[in-house]
Image: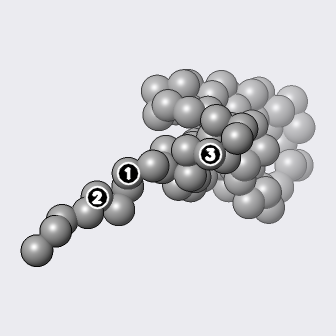
Amino acid sequence: MERRNENEGTRLVWSVVTGEKTGGEEPHFDYPTALQALILEAQSYLQEMQKNPQLEPRPIGLFCEKVPDEEFLGL
C-alpha cells in the first residue's frame, strides 16, 4: 500500500484576524512572525481601549490556511 503525504505541495499561511475579518488580510508565512504580528495588534488595540473605553470589544486571533505551493509561489 502506497502512503501519500497529504500536506506535500502545500504551505501554511498565517494572518492576524480582528473583528469580523475572515483572514488573509496580511499573510505571514511562518508562525513566529504571525505571532509577533498578533502581539503587536493586541498591544495597539489595548492602547485604543485605554484612550477610548467606550470601544466595543473585538476578537483578535490568528487565521491559518493551507495553500498550494503554486499559489504560495505565485505560479
Rounded to the nearest angstrom, the CA distance separating label 2 from label 1 is 5 Å
The front one of 9 and 18 is: 9
Rounded to the nearest angstrom, the CA distance separating label 1 from label 3 is 12 Å
Residue 70 appears at what percent x and percent y? 62, 45
Is 61 situated left or right of 48 in this image?
left
- Residue name at image x 72 percent, y 49 percent: 24
Identity of the amino acid at label 1? Glu
- Residue name at image x 70 percent, y 41 percent: 75
Mark 2 and mark 1 in contact? Answer it, CB < 8 Å. Answer: yes
Residue 22: image tag: none
The front one of 6 and 17 is: 6
Q: Residues within 10 Å of mark 1 (few under 14, many from 20)?
A: few
Residue 42 appears at what percent x and percent y? 65, 34
Q: Identify the secondary structure beneath mark 2.
A: loop
Q: Residues within 10 Å of mark 2 (few under 14, many from 20)?
A: few
Circle 1 is placed at which residue position? 8
The front one of 54 and 72 is: 72
In this rendering, is residue 15 above or below 56?
Answer: above
Q: Residues within 10 Å of mark 3 (few under 14, many from 20)?
A: few
- Residue 6 visible within the image: yes
Mark positioned earlier in the residue sequence (1 or 3): 1
In this rendering, is residue 17 above or below 74?
Answer: below
Residue 70: image tag: 3
Identity of the amino acid at label 2? Asn
Is 6 situated left or right of 41 in this image?
left
- Residue name at image x 71 percent, y 53 percent: 23
Residue 5: image tag: 2
Q: Identify the secondary structure beneath mark 3.
A: helix
In this rendering, is residue 61 above or below 45?
Answer: below
Rounded to the nearest angstrom, the CA distance separating label 3 from label 2 is 17 Å
Identity of the amino acid at label 3? Glu
- Residue name at image x 46 percent, y 27 percent: 32
